[in-house]
Amino acid sequence: MTTQKQATGQWGEETAARYLETNGYTILARNFHTAHGEIDIVASKEGGLVFVEVKTRSSHAFAYPEDSVTRRKQAHLLSAAEDYLQAHPEGGDSWQFDVIAIERIPAGKPEIFHFENVIE
């Protein structure tokens, strides 16, 4: 059984994937699971890898979606990316982390914010 939170998350990831493809990215993997966590989307653009964390909310009354990418979450993303790179050595030397924050607007077009290269 899918909860409302899971359904919102799935919708957000699908919306983010369409957004990325529309903007010239190629989706290589979705929901890549590792012992350190999950990478929502792995994409490529102009020869580089992009690890994308998607955060979706139906409101920013309590916090903006991107606020939930804490230092701890960033550390998990780095470890998960290392696992991906070990499993896919053809990925190359150029990679970055992006966050796509989506706010689901009732009866309207979602607001999408793309934060590039957020972890250094």
Image (cartoon, rainbow, N blue to C red):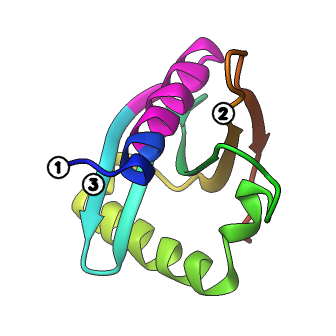
Name the residue at 74% across, 58% down: 66
46 or 17: nearer the viewer: 17
Mark 3 or mark 1, which is nearer the start of the sequence?
A: 1
Pick whichever, 70 or 56, lies toward us: 56
What is the magenta segment's predominant secondary structure? Answer: helix
Residue assigned mark 2: 104
Contact? badges 2 and 3 (CB < 8 Å): no
- Residue for point 74% across, 47% down: 59
Instruction: Assess disc 2: are there few (<14), some (14-19) or many (≥20) residues with their C-alpha within 10 Å of its C-alpha.
Output: some
Question: What type is the residue that disc 1 sits on?
Answer: Met
Of the image marks 2 and 3, the number of the one nearer the N terminus:
3
In magenta, the rendered stretch is 10-27
SS at circle 1: loop
Asked whether disc 2 touches disc 1, contact meaning CB atoms under 8 Å apart, the reply is no
Q: Position of residue 14 (x, y in %)?
A: 44, 29
Provide the residue designation for mark 1.
Answer: 1
Q: Of all residues shown, which one is farthest toward the left?
A: 1
Spatial separation of the CA atoms under disc 2 and disc 1: 22 Å
For residue 9, say whether it is visible.
yes
Q: Which residue is mark 3?
A: 88
